[in-house]
Amino acid sequence: MPDLIQTADIAVAAPIDKSLTYAIPGEFSTIAQVGVRVRVPLGRRTATGYILSRGTGSPKGLKPIQDVLDSAPLFSEAWGNDLRRAAAYYRFPIGDVLRTALPAGLSGAGHDISPLRERLYQTTDQSGSVRGKKQQEILAYIRKNGPVAMTELRDHFTAPHSVLNRLVETGFLTATVQERIRDPFRDSLPPADKIVIPGEEQAVAINRLLQEFDKNSFSCALLHGVTGSGKTEIYLRLIEAVLANNKQALVLVPEIALTPQLVGRFRARFSDRGVSIAVLHSGLSDGERYDAWRSIMRNEIQIVIGARSAVFAPLPNLGVIVVDEEHETSYKQAEGFRYNARDFALLRGQSTSALVVLGSATPSPAVYKRAQDGDYLYLRLSGRVAKRPLPPVSLIDLREAEVDGHFSSELLLALGETLQAGDQSLLLLNRRGFSPYLICAGCGTSPRCPNCAITLTYYQGQRQLRCNYCDYSERPSVLCPKCNGPDLLPEGVGTEQLESELATRFPAARIARMDRDTTGRKGSHQRLVQQVLDKEIDILVGTQMVAKGHDFPGVTLVGVLDADNSLNFPDFRSAERTFSLLSQVAGRAGRGEKPGRVLVQTYSPDHYALQSAATHDYAGFYAEEIPFRESLGYPPFGYLINLVFSGNDADKVAHTATNVASILNRVAQDAEVLGPAPCPLARLRGKTRFQILLKGEKRLPLHRMLQHITGKASPIPAGVRMIVDIDPIDML
Ligand code: ADP
Ligand code: ZN
């Protein structure tokens, strides 16, 4: 029997499905720990890899690790195992999965982040006085303030270098070099905490969650609370108990934009108790994320808050994971490693025996069903805090209403009254730009994106036509590009137009717009939110961004311009999305002392999604929605996998999709193969797109079918790309 050697399972940063095994040369045997990055040979080149686990094996055929890049692990073995499971489930190369999960700057690509160091000065026990005014001042300052960093001294004294050196030479000071954590809160004070007494339903929910947590094993709870029911207070109280048990908490929010508000409330509650909170999201600088990550690994952090990717935070001793607004589609990554952070949170909860709390006013049907089936603990908050009423919602039938411009007379009247009363209004219109397209009155032509199969959105302020999917833009021509007719006119309404229409109607009102075009710059979204809170804005117009999560106590009127927009989407979830969007935006009204009201303009006032949103009736919505899902085998009654084929050569893409569909049809068992068909967005960024949808009652048969078209069996020719989207959300 040959001698056994030490080996390592390594996720190599390359498109390879599985981890690879390498030999650990003797000199690396102590430092090649699980969780460090290494350089390994791969074919004729070298690549970066991550050690997932270690073992022993025969040296036969094993190549050696060439170098070890980290002195401390970036993750634990258990964490790596969770990612292995996710990689297998989402059929994405394990190395690329790790690259997505780890903070940027650790790719080994050359521009890596390293720790930031700073010099600290500290007094010695040498007493006596020094000569020179500057020496005296600096020494006095350090004696008073304890160890002081160079950066701080530079803020207080001009050019302190030589004086400091002198004080070190004469033995009055010592200097040490330490790491300085890049902390985005370093210089800001936490806001004041709000002491609240939990209401009855809140108290019940808190107690049940504490009981669950005490079991020290995995379980999941759905916290189903209407908007403004005080879910955050429940998270705060639960997390207090978790920390008291020396465990840690992870809190996920659906959008980066919502982190500052929540972080503020957590800091207000915890920061004077010596609790360290880290924020992890893609809006941080690479250095900040890298530092936060390593602080978490060193067990210095008790609470991590962040958007989707924070679910990968390597907290060593997790007690609870909160997924706020669990129904939000932004938890699903739309490209690359297409994971769903809510689902991964459940997987991590299982592997770490943590409690997972899913919070929502409008739970996704899948989660609600599991709670109904008894798999999850179901906790209901049926009313708002302090007995504040939910706002009444009126549906305005646009087929019959008196309409002036884009406003029904009812909505105009309500806007006027709200302004008069000195209160704030929020208007939702889920379309950006001035109008969604231009159209020639003579021949009906609309300018389209040359790269994508959609019309170009018209922006009047910048006199531009822009594609909402790629970065294409052009100046609109005066004459129709096709028939040279003189009437190329804007058709339909977007937020930009609404904003200017309001300015004409209410010249005294302070109006602002919140959409992707006005919040592109760093901090601009936060500024708008602050202006609304400070009552510097009377009417806020925006896309679905305005609907999400904000707590604006001064808003008493919410208007929805066009509720049918999302209802008419070619997607089986369109009713769910409409219901949830309307419930969320309605939830922005009347959160403060004054009651609110909601006006919804629509052409389909009888649709159950609108009817049940108007009566704040989740159960009613669910009861209507579920038979339709069941009869068609859609989630939560079945599973989906979407295969998207794309490429420059339209015929080749179509042919490949047809070929794959016939292979799948041949091997299909307990599964349906739908398509191939052109994607709703049949052309995107110059590429032709086709899709095949796999549908089945169980997961496993669908995954088995994929084995016939991926890996070695892949029939995908060069020039065509196939994307495998497991549990797809966006199927455009
Ligand atoms: P949700 O997340 O359910 O929409 P929030 O947690 O944001 O609701 O709570 C809404 C507001 O009510 C917050 O300003 C919060 O501080 C306040 N609040 C929460 N619980 C109570 C309570 N028991 N009594 C009074 N105010 C409360
Ligand atoms: Zn385009």
Image: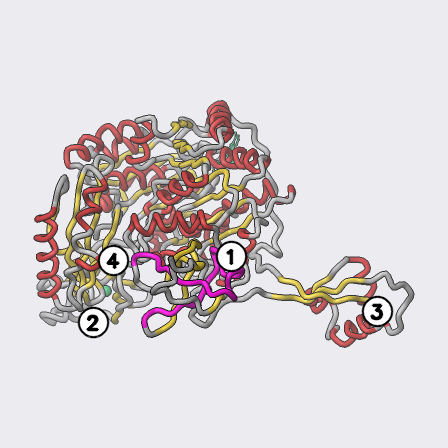
- The vertical placement of 259 against 33, above or below, is above
Q: Quick check: 146 left or right of 241?
A: right
Quadrant hosting residue 454: bottom left
Label 3: how many Cα within 10 Å (few below 14, some 14–19, many 20+): some
Label 1: how many Cα within 10 Å (few below 14, some 14–19, many 20+): many
State the residue in front, 203 or 727.
Answer: 727
Q: Which numbered disc, 1 or 4, marks the residue closer to the eye? A: 1
Q: Which mark is first along the chain, 4 or 1? A: 1
Q: Position of residue 15 (x, y in %)?
A: 30, 63
Q: Which residue is mark 2?
A: 477
Specify start and end residues of the magenta stretch as a single range.
17-43
Residue drawn at x 22%, y 54% as measured from the top left = 492
What distance separates the C-alpha of mark 1 from that of mark 2? 58 Å
What distance separates the C-alpha of mark 3 from that of mark 1? 38 Å
Q: Which numbered disc, 2 or 3, marks the residue closer to the eye? A: 3
Query: As shown in the figure, which amino acid type bears the numbered disc 2?
Result: Ser
Q: Position of residue 367 (x, y in %)?
A: 32, 35
Q: Which numbered disc, 1 or 2, marks the residue closer to the eye? A: 1
What distance separates the C-alpha of mark 2 from that of mark 4? 15 Å
Q: How many marks?
A: 4
Q: Position of residue 6 (x, y in %)?
A: 45, 58
Q: Which residue is mark 1?
A: 73
Instruction: Check if residue 386 falls in the magenta segment.
Output: no
Q: Is disc 3 placed on a helix, strand or loop? A: loop
What distance separates the C-alpha of mark 1 from that of mark 4? 52 Å
Q: Which residue is mark 3?
A: 171
Query: As shown in the figure, which amino acid type bears the numbered disc 3?
Result: Gly
Q: Position of residue 381 (x, y in %)?
A: 42, 28
